Amino acid sequence: MTGHKHFADLSQASLEETSIFDSKYFPNPWTKAKWNQVSNGELGPCMLGLVYKDKRLVGLILFGIADPDTGHLYKILVSPDEQGSGLSQELLLRSESHLQHGKYISVYLEVEQSNLRALAFYQKHGYQVLVKKKGFYGAGRDGLALEHILPKLV
């Protein structure tokens, strides 16, 4: 990967930029109103990690952290030109480490059942399927709820 990358948080990003990135690359993008809910705290506390390369947003990860034990992974997204570079894994592992240090026990997420690439990624990182959510993403588009128990820090 060429160029310098750095991690940032929501305070260093424009909400507009994050919303555009999401709508451009995520299969189920949020509306600008939903991103405003993240920004003004209506979704409860959130942890947003952003990755920039050459001043261009190339990755994001967003967790809901209202539950004192479980982080809810809302989104992980990497631009197409960075896919396969290990950036998704780096985002996930850094975020899980941050949650562990915050005394979180597990991470929960939903993924569309037909998204086999994402499902394989999560299972590779220790996520287990909890339940199928019929029609979660719309008619005929089932979701799977997954959970990963975070290793205890010693």
Image (cartoon, rainbow, N blue to C red):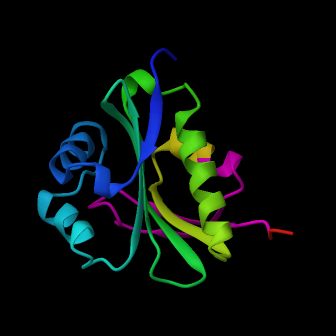
Q: Residue furthest bottom?
A: 68
Q: Is residue 133 magenta?
A: yes
Identify the residue at horizontal 12%, vertical 65% (top origin).
33
Location of residue 6 in the rendering, given as x and y in whole percent from the top left corner? 46, 36
Is 29 above or below relative to 36?
A: above
Give left or right: position of 144 versus 50.
right
Give left or right: position of 83 versus 56.
right
Towards the viewer: 153 or 8: 8
Position of the C terminus, as image quadrant, is bottom right
Identify the residue at horizontal 27%, vertical 68% (top origin).
38
Identify the residue at horizontal 30%, vertical 57% (top origin).
11
Numbered range of the magenta stretch: 122-151
Q: Is residue 130 visible?
A: no
Location of residue 9 in the rendering, given as x and y in whole percent from the top left corner? 38, 54
Q: Is residue 41 magenta?
A: no
Location of residue 119 in the rendering, given as x and y in whole percent from the top left corner? 56, 48
Towards the viewer: 82 or 114: 82
